Amino acid sequence: MINTEMLDELARKLASALPQNVLVFQRDIEKNLRAGLEGLFQKLDLVTREEFEVQATLLARSRERLTLLEKQIEALEASSGLTKPQAKKD
């Protein structure tokens, strides 16, 4: 989920960019902008940087493990004589 402080800050900045005669309604506009932005960000299905980093680390570990397992399978196939001919790679 997105940081609510960042969302509040963004809503404040957008509201402050409005013309002077609209500043009377600034708080209402900020609330509406915040609600709109929050809805938009929820639809985008965003993740935090921390969540992204955790998933990237898990993916890297999985790739390393997969590479290791592939090498082990190749070694077992070679030692047992079960090696299949390699498909041509273009």
Image: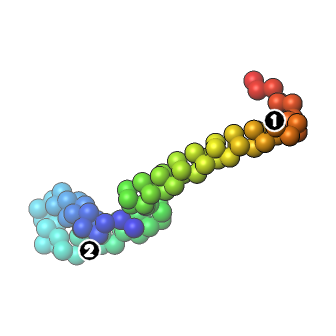
Q: What element carries label 1?
A: helix
- Above or below: residue 12 compared with residue 55: below
Snapshot quadrant of residue 7: bottom left
Task: Estimate how packed mark 2 is, as few (under 14), some (14 to 19) or many (20 or more) residues with alpha carbons within 10 Å.
Answer: some
Left or right, 26 with reference to 81: left
The residue beneath circle 2 is: 31
| Residue 52 drawn at (x, y percent) | 44, 56
Distance in Å between CA atoms under marks 1 and 2: 67 Å
The residue at 24%/67% (across/down) is: 5
Left or right, 6 with reference to 46: left
The residue at 57%/45% (across/down) is: 64
The residue beneath circle 1 is: 78
Instruction: Tell me the amino acid under the disc marked 1.
Output: Ala
Q: Which quarter of the figure is the C terminus placed in?
A: top right
Instruction: Tell me the amino acid under the disc marked 2.
Output: Lys
Task: Estimate how packed mark 1 is, as few (under 14), some (14 to 19) or many (20 or more) residues with alpha carbons within 10 Å.
Answer: few
The residue at 81%/35% (across/down) is: 78
Q: Nearer the viewer, residue 17 or 58?
A: 58
- The answer to whether residue 62 shows anywhere in this view is yes
Sooner in the amino-acid sequence: mark 1 or mark 2: 2
| Residue 42 drawn at (x, y percent) | 44, 67
| Residue 45 drawn at (x, y percent) | 48, 63
